[in-house]
Structure formats: structure tokens, C-alpha cells
Image (cartoon, rainbow, N blue to C red):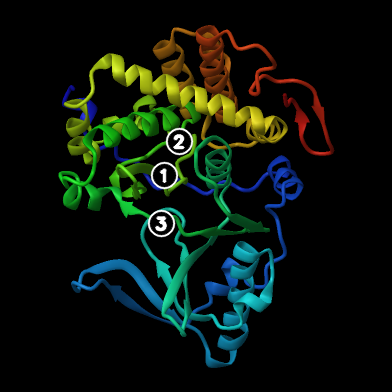
């Protein structure tokens, strides 16, 4: 693999994109928009902050924040209600024994999130969720992950606030350092999962999947340990203009993982795993035809990147796939649809599948979203 392909792809801080009317209508239609008792702006009014260190004394780049005493009770109650909406469909009785143990603020990255630590004091069990500024890029990334990956995600929006559940797992950089050569982890299963993860990211144009932006989930099974790789950062959904930015294999941070896996797969086996993931993507979309269609329609009508980035990515995808249809796309959403359509056409050619293509535009009209869905 060429050295330039493995260089770190530096990016300037991505701007947040407003939630457009078509996206808002989608969120309302599918139960993602809700009235929340605490917003991002409410949490941003903290009065003190102290650096948060890990068990080894290292700075985590998070700060624990403090609010005026007279606000704390109402703020904590509101955060517990949000947790109830996320985890128990708003059933507040299940929250009676929970407390808000800590509110942390992150000064690093694009979204500057707040992390809420919820604890059951009777058994010290804890969970986290995040409160962030609503960014259209991230919302589309979350929803595409929910619909097209093996993972289901719980999140809510309220105006300019986005609330997300915590995605549990071993951060990719930590896994590479501590777990990569663990004999309990099947090298073949890990290699297979990397190929499938790489394919999912590229087909739906999820960028910046360097090691610290995904997690590795290890699940004990009756014959060894199953491995899953999950994205946990969706800020760079369809923003960058460079094609390689959407292929995790090209990030320098991921090189040890890529080299480890490439020694255990031949090209034919890797291609088989790509085909398997493409088939799964198609089947998942078939079960959510209306929803994925409305999402892509809204995405085509939402600004997610400057025009020069769209043009560059369109040209690189057209050259990479040998398909001029990419060159005619004028939005990132249109490129995502075209990528999914190409994948689905290849699936149909391989399998002889009959029936409607879940990514193909049809006719759809509503007050804000005027366009297409299957």
C-alpha cells in the first residue's frame, strides 16, 4: 500500500449544518423529534468546570461542569426524563432510583458534546448519554447507520438539540494497542469484520473512520469470540471531497489493523465478504423502503458540504466506479443515493433478484419534502 495512501488525512473543523425543513419533517414523521425538558443551551450555561482525568491521571479532554445550586434539582430531573424517553418510552417510574452522577463537557472535536452519567446508587450500575448541538450531517449519519447497518441507534432531536445514546465498545485505537494480538480474538473473524465495516462506510459515504472514531465489540460465543466494528462518530457523514476519506483502510491510524487483517485474507475471500455485506445492506433497505426513500429525498435537498467538495467527490467517484452518473450529482445526498443505487444494481446482477429496488426514486409528495422515494 502506497505511503501517501496511508498518510493522516487532516481536516479542518467541520461546520455544523442546520436541520432543514425536509429533514425536520422526516424526524417528526419517524418519531425522532420530541419535546425535551433540557436543551443544549440549558447545559451550556454552566458556571464552573474542572478537568476530568482517567484512572491513570491522564487528561481525557473532558471537563466536569457545575451549575448554580438553585438550578441543579430541575436540571437533573429533566435529564432523567430525557433518559426515560430514550430508554423506556418516557416511563418515568423506572427512573425513581436513578441519579445524575456527573455532567461532562468536551472541548475537543466538532460537536462539543455534554456527556451525562446516570447511576443506580443501589448497585452502582451506570450508563451515559450525550447532548449535542443538532447538526444535519450527524443526524443523517445516525439515521443511515440505524437503517443500513446491523446496529440500531436511539437518538432524539428537539429544535437545535440532539440527544444520543452511548455506543459501547473498545475504542479502535485502544483495541489496536491492547487487544489486536489477543489469542482469544479470532484473526479471521476480525479480518472479515474489517472488510464489511470498510464496505458499509464507503457505500453510504461515512467519512473519517480513523481508529478513535469507531469501537470494537467483542461478544463471547459458544465457539470463540464474535467481533463487531461500530462507528461511533457521525460528524463526517458526506462532507469531505476526497474519496479515500470514506475508506477506513487508508487512515494511518488504522494501518496496524489493516496489515494484521491483510495477512489473513486473500483477494477472493475479501471480495466474498464485500458481496455478503452488500447483500445485507440491500436486504435491510428492503425492510425499510419507505423510510430510506424519504431519508434520501430529504438528504438530496439538504446542504451538507460546499459545492467544491461535492464536485470533487462526484468526479472521484465517477472515475473510481467508471460510472458517469456520479459526475451529474450536485449534492452529497445525491451522491449517497447514486452510491447505493450502484451497489444495488451490482447485487441484482449477481443474484438475479427481482422486485423493486429499495434505493430507486419513485414518487413522493409532502409539504416540505418534494421529491422521490421508492
Image quarter of the C terminus: top right
Closer to the eye: label 3 or 2: 3
The answer to whether mark 1 and mark 2 are in CB contact below 8 A is yes
| In the image, residue 82 above or below residue 205 | below
Left or right: residue 180 versus residue 244 is left
Label drawn at residue 231: 1
Q: Give SS at disc 2.
A: loop
- Residue at the spot of label 3: 168
Mark 3 or 1: the one toward you: 3
Name, please, the residue furthest toward the front. 222
Say which residue label 2 marks: 206
Of the image marks 1 and 2, the number of the one nearer the N terminus: 2
Q: Secondary structure at mark 1?
A: strand
Is residue 115 among the parts visible in the rendering?
no
Residue at figure coordinates x 54%, y 35% from the top left: 148
Q: Residue at x 64, y 36 (%)?
A: 302
Identify the residue at image location x=54%, y=45%.
Answer: 142
Label 3: few (<14), some (14–19) or many (≥20) C-alpha neighbours in 10 Å: few
Would residue 230 appear left or right of 134 to someone viewing this image? left
The one of 340 and 355 positioned closer to us in this rendering: 355
Which sits in the foreground, 334 or 281? 281
Q: Quadrant of residue 246?
A: top left
Horizontally, residue 167 falls left or right of residue 304, namely left
Which x, y percent locates residue 223?
30, 42
Amino acid at each position: 500500500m502506497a505511503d501517501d495512501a496511508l498518510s493522516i488525512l487532516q481536516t479542518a473543523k467541520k461546520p455544523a449544518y442546520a436541520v432543514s425543513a425536509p429533514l425536520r419533517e422526516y424526524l417528526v414523521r419517524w418519531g425522532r423529534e420530541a419535546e425535551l425538558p433540557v436543551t443544549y443551551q440549558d447545559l451550556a450555561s454552566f458556571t464552573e468546570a474542572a478537568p476530568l482525568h482517567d484512572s491513570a491521571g491522564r487528561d481525557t479532554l473532558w471537563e466536569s461542569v457545575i451549575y448554580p445550586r438553585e438550578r441543579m434539582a430541575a436540571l437533573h430531573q429533566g435529564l432523567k426524563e430525557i433518559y426515560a424517553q430514550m430508554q423506556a418510552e418516557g416511563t418515568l417510574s423506572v427512573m425513581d432510583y436513578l441519579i445524575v452522577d456527573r455532567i461532562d463537557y468536551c472541548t475537543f472535536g466538532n460537536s462539543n458534546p455534554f456527556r451525562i452519567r446516570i447511576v443506580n446508587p443501589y448497585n452502582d450500575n451506570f450508563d451515559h448519554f450525550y447532548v449535542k448541538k443538532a447538526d444535519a450531517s450527524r443526524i443523517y449519519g445516525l439515521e443511515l447507520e440505524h437503517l443500513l447497518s446491523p446496529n440500531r441507534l436511539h437518538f432524539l432531536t428537539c429544535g437545535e438539540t440532539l440527544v444520543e445514546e452511548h455506543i459501547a465498545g473498545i475504542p479502535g485505537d485502544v483495541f489496536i494497542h491492547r487487544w489486536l494480538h489477543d489469542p482469544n480474538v479470532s484473526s479471521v473473524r476480525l479480518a472479515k469484520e474489517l472488510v464489511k465495516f470498510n464496505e458499509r462506510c464507503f457505500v453510504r459515504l461515512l467519512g473519517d473512520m480513523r481508529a478513535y472514531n469507531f469501537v470494537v465489540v467483542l461478544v463471547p460465543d459458544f465457539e470463540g469470540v464474535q467481533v463487531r466494528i461500530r462507528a461511533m462518530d457521525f460528524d463526517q457523514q458526506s462532507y469531505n471531497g476526497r474519496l479515500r476519506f470514506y475508506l477506513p483502510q487508508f487512515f494511518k491510524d488504522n494501518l496496524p489493523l489493516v496489515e494484521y487483517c491483510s495477512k489473513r485474507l486473500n483477494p477472493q475471500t475479501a471480495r466474498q465478504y464485500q458481496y455478503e455485506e452488500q447483500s445485507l445492506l440491500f436486504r435491510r433497505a428492503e425492510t425499510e423502503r419507505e423510510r430510506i426513500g424519504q431519508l434520501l429525498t430529504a438528504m438530496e435537498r439538504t446542504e451538507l458540504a460546499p459545492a467544491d467538495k461535492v464536485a470533487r467527490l462526484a468526479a472521484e467517484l465517477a472515475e473510481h466506479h467508471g460510472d458517469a452518473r456520479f459526475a451529474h450529482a450536485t449534492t452529497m445526498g445525491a451522491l449517497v443515493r447514486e452510491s447505493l443505487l450502484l451497489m444495488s444494481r451490482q447485487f441484482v446482477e449477481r443474484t438475479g433478484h427481482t422486485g423493486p429496488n429499495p434505493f430507486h426514486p419513485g414518487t413522493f409528495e409532502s409539504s416540505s419534502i418534494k421529491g422521490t422515494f421508492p
